[in-house]
Image (cartoon, helix red, strand yellow):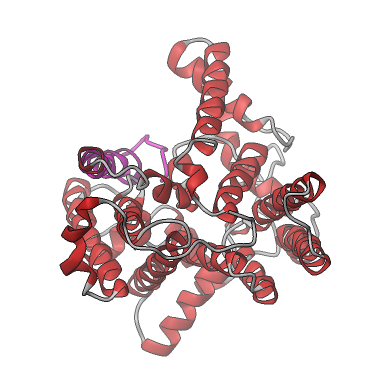
């Protein structure tokens, strides 16, 4: 298949397709929303049960309702931003280092929630969860259409199942910005697949101010540029001048969006490093104060975690190498290569971004959710046993993730 062609939306070719006869009479969007609704019921039960365990823990100061439980941790930072905005003066530690503050979080989600509060009269917790739910439901619809570019109906729907029950899928219904980020990322990928180039520019701007993803998008489009040049040189597919111009322009635009928040923080606080210093404040809990040096964070983290768990930093760094090799094996697997080129390059570009700047910690699992195209790759094999196992293991994973990361106990610092 050429890089510019869109795979026909064919029916399942397997002999078992008759089992889908009744299901196919139901409109695709109803099927997707049913999967989403059932998965949210399962996750809500898990969250409520864990919330019962959490009762009496000092955090909100009150016995929790679901929405209060679902808007803790980073949700508290978003609420602070939505209600009071960003500080013009950075908080400093006794040593003079920047401490944790709202500049680590992008503005689109908290200001959207605040707007909904003003329109509806809802309080923060209810409005925050509602925005997340609406965005995640819409994301499922868009992701399904994206999957249908390269997968059959059954595979695409199963990909949605895997996405909705993923171990970190509770993030889809809590007061975080991930749901909106995933929605707009899926919209962007679908626009790219359909060659709606002009519309990608405003989407990149909004998603880049919703989640720190501008540089990841630039990595994806940069990889796409190299991919098309390679095909052009080989004579496989010409790189048309118009698409060449759009690809370069979108890459430059994404880079600009990626650095925009740094410049905004500089303009407000007067410190050019306000944003990066704020981000570093979170990792200083682990490795102390330091500078941001690209492509070193995972090895620094591997060394720190290796020393903590195994008494050997070298062991931790070795595990980091194994993780990287394992990811590359997944990225170049036959199942992943079944996806459209933009989905594959997004996973690769996002991984490059994380490897360059992100420090591995308890929130790493949640940060991986934008790699949702891999749920489609996981749905490529048609083994019923494999699919049942993945769903069951994912639900168990949800329970473990919520218990380990979402529940706060005194002395614990493993934010989701």
Relative to residue 226, is residue 288 drawn left or right? left
The front one of 23 and 138 is 23
On the image, which quarter does residue 161 sit in?
A: bottom left
For the stretch drawn in magenta, the main secondary structure is helix
On the image, which quarter does residue 209 sit in?
A: bottom right
Residue 24 vertical position relative to residue 224 in the rendered view, above or below: below
The picture places residue 194, in percent across and down from the top left corner, at 59, 70
The picture places residue 325, in percent across and down from the top left corner, at 55, 26
Relative to residue 24, is residue 408 drawn left or right? right
* Residue 71 seen: no
Q: Read off the magenta span.
A: 388-416
On the image, which quarter does residue 234 sit in?
A: top right
* Residue 302 seen: yes
- At 65% from the left edge and 67% from the top edge, which residue is drawn? 204
Residue 7 vertical position relative to residue 28 in the rendered view, above or below: above
Magenta stretch holds residue 193:
no
């Amino acid at each position: 298949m050429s890089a510019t062609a869109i795979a026909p939306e064919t029916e399942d070719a397997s002999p078992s397709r008759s089992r889908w006869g009744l299901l196919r009479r139901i409109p695709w969007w109803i099927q997707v929303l049913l999967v989403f609704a059932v998965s949210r019921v399962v996750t809500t039960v898990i969250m409520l049960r864990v919330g019962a365990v959490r009762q009496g823990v000092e955090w909100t100061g009150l016995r929790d309702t679901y929405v209060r439980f679902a808007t803790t941790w980073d949700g508290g930072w978003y609420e602070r931003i939505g209600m009071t905005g960003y500080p013009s003066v950075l908080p400093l530690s006794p040593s003079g280092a920047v401490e944790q503050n709202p500049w680590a979080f992008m503005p689109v989600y908290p200001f959207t929630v605040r707007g909904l509060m003003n329109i509806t009269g809802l309080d923060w917790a209810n409005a925050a969860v509602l925005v997340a739910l609406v965005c995640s439901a819409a994301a499922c619809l868009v992701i399904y259409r994206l999957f249908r570019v390269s997968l059959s109906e059954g595979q695409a729907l199963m990909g949605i199942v895997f996405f909705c029950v993923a171990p970190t899928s509770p993030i889809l219904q809590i007061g975080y910005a991930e749901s909106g980020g995933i929605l707009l990322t899926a919209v962007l990928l679908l626009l790219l697949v359909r060659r709606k180039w002009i519309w990608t520019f405003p989407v990149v701007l909004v998603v880049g101010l919703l989640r720190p993803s501008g540089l990841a998008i630039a990595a994806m489009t940069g990889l796409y540029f190299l991919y098309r040049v390679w095909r052009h040189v080989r004579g496989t597919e010409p790189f048309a001048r118009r698409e060449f111009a759009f690809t370069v322009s979108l890459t430059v635009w994404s880079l600009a969006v990626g650095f925009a928040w740094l410049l905004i923080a500089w303009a407000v606080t007067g410190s050019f490093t306000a944003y990066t210093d704020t981000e570093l404040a979170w990792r200083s809990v682990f490795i102390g104060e330091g500078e941001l040096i690209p492509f070193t964070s995972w090895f620094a983290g591997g060394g720190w975690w290796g020393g903590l768990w195994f008494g050997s930093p070298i062991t931790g760094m070795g595990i980091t190498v194994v993780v990287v090799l394992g990811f590359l094996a997944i990225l170049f697997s036959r199942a992943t290569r079944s996806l459209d080129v933009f989905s594959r390059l997004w996973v690769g570009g996002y991984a490059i971004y994380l490897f360059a700047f992100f420090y591995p910690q308890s929130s790493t699992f949640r940060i991986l959710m934008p790699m949702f195209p891999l749920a489609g790759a996981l749905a490529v094999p048609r083994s019923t046993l494999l699919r049942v196992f993945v769903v069951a293991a994912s639900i168990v994973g949800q329970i473990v993730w919520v218990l380990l990361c979402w529940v706060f106990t005194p002395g614990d610092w493993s934010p989701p």
